[in-house]
Image (spheres, rainbow, N blue to C red):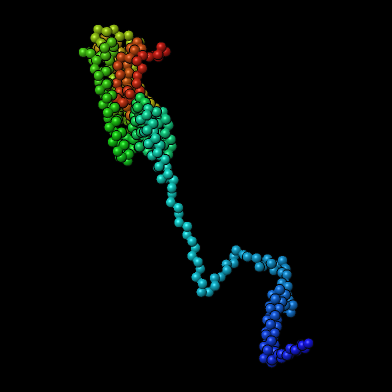
Amino acid sequence: MQAATPMPKQRVGKTFIVAISILGFAVLVQLAAVGHAFFSRYHPLSEAEPQPPLPLLAPAQIAKLAPSDDLVPAEPAGIVPKPTPVTAPLPKRDAPVAEGRLAELVENARALRERGDTSTALTRLREAQTISPDQPLVLSELAITYEKMGLNEKAMEQWRRIYEMGETAGIYFSAADAKIKAVEAQSNASTTSAMKGDADGIQPGSVLGLGDITQEEEADPKAQRKFSLKIPLKARPNSRIDVANVVIQVFFYDIVNGKDVVQTNATVNYRWSTSPPTWQEDDIEILNVEYLQPQPDAKARRAAEDRKYFGYVVRVYYKKELQDMRADPVTLLKQYPPPLSLDADTK
């Protein structure tokens, strides 16, 4: 029987013990450092001195500390104050916008007029007038539109407005001048043809006719304007004229403020050279018509309107039928055309 051989006992060396000791000490140091850091972070020091509470201020002291309008904080020495910003004025955009809208309306009106829709074109131009009432371009387009609608008198009103602007209307002034001259030439030709009459100088079918009317100025210091018209009225030879059936109408017109032609407010007097006129001894009777515009008095002169003599219209009726007519300037015949016959109650 074999006996067990005992295992020999191994001894631990000193080097090993020293190494283990150093390693254990290092571990302990690290654990201590970690614990100190943790404790310092999550548990504030209890040894810190408490801060004294803020003192309460009495109401009077609070009022003294309130900001005042009279106090201006001083700038720290050596610091340059910031410059005050200046806001640049924004450019006005209303004028360009209005001009653009006006041009758009005019172009729209032209297109509508070309398509024959003159009523809507007129509406667009009137809208353009609200933007610029005295714009020559708009006035000329209105005149052209009125002409296309057959409203020649309204068209001439617009051309006259442009003409009265003078050279400031530019090319539109030249167009207005040409239009007015063309209408006057046409009126003169029509009037001359209508008044040419027969060999006796009287319209065919008429028994009375007008001769050449003359105008004589009269000096009067109390009058702003005073003159007389001499109106020859000729009867057809061998005609018996019933004076009760002769009606002569003489209308004077003034221009107010340089643009509006209205019937005069002057004093007008009538007188026959031979009274009563019979056309028996002579076939011509002369009617004198006096125009008297007095000077305004000193008080009314300041408020007085700018009224000046413009022209006249003469009409002759016999037995309520138109016999003859004259006008100076002749454009008044277009502006105030005479009725061919008088109403039953006209005397």
Please state the horizontal and vertical placement of residue 180, each as a whole percent of the image.
29, 30
Identify the residue shown where x is 28% and y is 11%. 206
338 versus 57 height, above or below = above
Residue 11 can be seen in this image = yes
Residue 256 can be seen in this image = no
Name the outermost residue toward the bottom.
14
Identify the residue shown where x is 34% and y is 15%. 340
- Front residue of 34/218: it is 34
* Left/right of residue 56 with respect to residue 198 in the rendered view: right
53 versus 324 height, above or below = below
Please state the horizontal and vertical placement of residue 223, each as a whole percent of the image.
35, 31
Please state the horizontal and vertical placement of residue 97, each as a whole percent of the image.
42, 44
Name the outermost residue toward the front.
1
> Which quadrant: the N terminus?
bottom right
- Front residue of 313/22: it is 22
* Left/right of residue 219 with respect to residue 11 in the rendered view: left
- Front residue of 32/199: it is 32
Q: Quadrant of residue 311?
A: top left
Please state the horizontal and vertical placement of residue 347, each as a whole percent of the image.
39, 14
299 versus 62 height, above or below = above
Q: Quadrant of residue 20?
A: bottom right
Identify the residue shown where x is 30% and y is 33%. 176
